[in-house]
């Protein structure tokens, strides 16, 4: 685990150094992924800004983690901002246009936070660091396009969720964060990732590995798991694949 962590830390530092950027900006939600990534960023020694951005949620775990980071690393300077008023105005404008579905508003929360992260990163000669793991980013596409998917680099996008939990344990991330059920924090009702996807991350990883291996699934429980995994994957492929471009090759 130590080698894995050192590899990621060095990768982040090397990328930032080559790009001549001096600051790492990370959105911190109090979830396991953002907690691990922000800690890896802090370990680079580069200036690290963990940002807690509230929109109708208290983000207690996010605040506790940001405080913990600040106490542990001299190069960390947290930022806390309440985006409620901005989101409220956006909400009113959306309702006026009739574009007011709950799913659209959930995605808009993520995109508003992305804008704030880039506002700070651009002002501080920095990078926005992604917090998505392999299952979310390349398995089921469980992220918001141009929201939490809008980042400069993705340090843990080749790590499974189980890898992230193991790193959290090694890094001594706050136990309350390690024990908390994963959630994207974008819904007023506090629904978890499992509520939304219909599978635990353990089941998602199993299905992802079976799909990549081309395994023939025979057990009913395995079939149900694979069907749920593939439904989400197929629905979200448009996020994971390059943006389609209309080819003009025949006119050349």
Image (cartoon, rainbow, N blue to C red):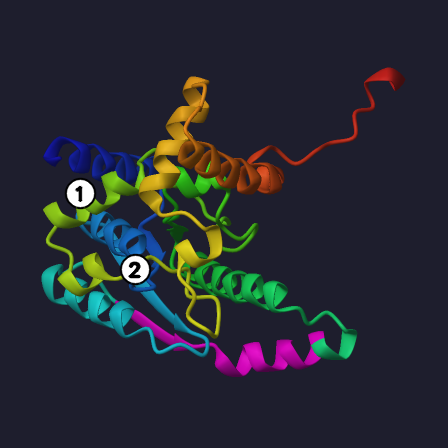
Disc on res. 166:
1
User: Can residue 49 be seen in this snapshot?
Assistant: yes
Is residue 83 magenta-colored? yes
Is residue 57 magenta-colored? no
Disc on res. 29:
none
Q: Secondary structure at mark 2?
A: loop
The percent position of residue 219, horizontal first and vertical second, equals: 41, 28
Residue placed at 22% from the left, 46% from the top?
A: 165
How packed is label 2: few (under 14 Cα within 10 Å), some, or many (20 or more)?
some
Residue placed at 51% from the left, 50% from the top?
A: 150
Q: Secondary structure at mark 1?
A: helix
The stretch of residues the image draws in magenta is 78-94
Q: Nearer the viewer, residue 104 or 82?
A: 104
The percent position of residue 208, horizontal first and vertical second, equals: 41, 31
The percent position of residue 30, horizontal first and vertical second, equals: 29, 64
Front tag of 1 and 2: 2
Q: Does residue 158 lie above or below 92 as drawn? A: above
Residue that protrudes farthest toward the right in the picture: 251
Q: Left or right? Give the position of 132 relative to 239.
A: left
Quadrant including the N terminus: top left
Q: Does residue 238 lie above or below 94 as drawn? A: above
**Residue 72 is drawn in which quadrant?**
bottom left
In 3D space, how far apart are the residues under numbered discs 1 and 2 (Cα atoms)?
A: 15 Å
Mark 2 lies on residue: 181
Quadrant including the C terminus: top right
Q: Left or right? Give the position of 102 relative to 127.
A: right
Dominant secondary structure (helix, strand or loop) of the stretch shown in magenta: helix
Number of callouts in the render?
Answer: 2
The percent position of residue 28, horizontal first and vertical second, equals: 33, 62
Residue placed at 35% from the left, 78% from the top?
A: 58
**Residue 135 is drawn in which quadrant?**
top left
Q: Nearer the viewer, residue 84 or 196?
A: 196
């Amino acid at each position: 685990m130590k080698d894995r962590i050192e590899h990621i830390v060095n990768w982040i530092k090397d990328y930032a150094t080559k790009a001549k950027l001096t600051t790492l900006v990370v959105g911190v939600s109090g979830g396991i992924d953002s907690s691990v990534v922000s800690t890896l960023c802090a370990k680079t020694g580069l200036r690290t800004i963990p940002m807690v951005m509230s929109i109708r949620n208290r983000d207690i775990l996010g605040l506790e983690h940001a405080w913990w980071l600040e106490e542990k690393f001299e190069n960390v300077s947290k930022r806390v901002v309440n985006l409620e008023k901005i989101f409220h105005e956006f909400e009113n404008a959306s309702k006026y246009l009739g574009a007011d579905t709950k799913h659209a508003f959930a995605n808009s929360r993520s995109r508003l936070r992305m804008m704030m992260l880039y506002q700070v990163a651009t002002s501080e000669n920095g990078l926005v660091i992604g917090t998505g793991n392999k299952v979310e980013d390349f398995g089921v596409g469980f992220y918001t396009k141009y929201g939490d998917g809008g980042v400069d680099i993705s340090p843990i996008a080749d790590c499974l969720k189980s890898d992230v939990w193991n790193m959290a344990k090694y890094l001594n991330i706050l136990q309350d964060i390690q024990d908390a059920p994963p959630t994207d924090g974008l819904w007023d009702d506090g629904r978890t990732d499992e509520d939304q996807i219909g599978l635990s991350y353990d089941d998602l990883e199993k299905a992802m590995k079976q799909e990549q291996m081309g395994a023939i699934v025979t057990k009913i429980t395995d079939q149900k798991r694979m069907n749920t995994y593939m439904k989400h994957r197929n629905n979200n492929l448009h996020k994971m694949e390059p943006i389609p471009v209309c080819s003009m090759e025949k006119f050349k």
